[in-house]
Amino acid sequence: MPQKLSVRSSLHPFPQGAFGSTHDLIDPIKACDRDTLLIACSELGAAPDNVSILAPERLVVLQHIGASIPSKFECEEYEELSFADVANLFDEYSFRHVIICGHLNCQVIPYWLQPKIETDTDIGHFRRRFENGTRDLVDRSYSQGSAAQRHVLMICEHVLCQIENFLTHPFVMKRAHAKELFFHGWVIDDETARVFRYNFEESVFEAI
Ligand SMILES: [Zn+2]
């Protein structure tokens, strides 16, 4: 992944101020225990703690397949989808930050990019949601590059699509508008543990 990867700013309807700065995130004066919800891919294991620039006591970690977040509309459409695990944590903790964390060595997203094997079941419609969401968005919005470029864009845009889904839940949008909750889009390089963050103002993913 390059030091800076530009993405198209017009693809997501993010409200102004929805993204927090790294400076604010790591500011020791503002930091409290369990003030940050980190949602990472199930494959990452304990990695989010290891690579994090945050003290482990700051974090509540959830692990979802491909760091997937169902939108309000998906939860209404598919009864097996739920945002309750996230919403319950918001009842329990006073989060000020949410980090959605993808990773470059993800095996889930390349698997979803392969043609579907007929006998595979798609529990939770994860593959279908990826195909109709991130994959369509990348293939429609970016010029044809190499397979490697497409792959990195899929990983990065998937993070932004999940943040977009997150914000469809009314209590989340309300807090983001009130500047009580700030989002951070991260992609981790599994090999170097380097964190690339989404810079909303410049519409790039850049190494922290
Ligand atoms: Zn993964």
Image (spheres, rainbow, N blue to C red):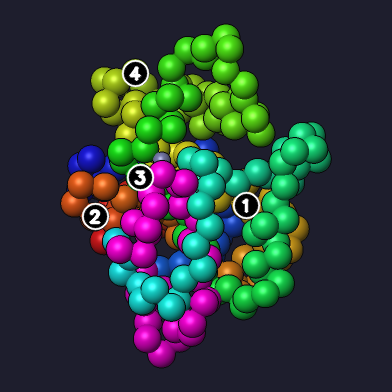
Q: Secondary structure at mark 1?
A: helix
**What residue is shown with label 3?**
103
The residues colored magenta run: 22-50
Real-space CA distance between mark 3 and mark 4, rounded to the nearest whole angstrom: 22 Å
Earlier sequence position, callout 1 versus callout 4: 4
Amino acid type shown at disc 1 = Phe
30 lies left or right of 51? right
Amino acid type shown at disc 2 = Ala
Residue density around tag 3, few if under 14, some if 14–19, many if 20 or more, within 10 Å:
many
User: Which of these two is toward me, 45 or 125?
Assistant: 45
Residue 203 shows in the view? no
Real-space CA distance between mark 1 and mark 4, rounded to the nearest whole angstrom: 29 Å
**What residue is shown with label 2?**
193
Earlier sequence position, callout 2 versus callout 4: 4
Q: Which mark is residue 166?
A: 1
Real-space CA distance between mark 2 and mark 4, rounded to the nearest whole angstrom: 29 Å
**What residue is shown with label 4?**
144
In the rendered image, which quarter is residue 16 located in? Answer: bottom right
Picture coordinates of residue 43, whole percent (x, y): 41, 44
Picture coordinates of residue 192, whole percent (x, y): 19, 51
Residue density around tag 2, few if under 14, some if 14–19, many if 20 or more, within 10 Å:
some
Q: Secondary structure at mark 4?
A: loop
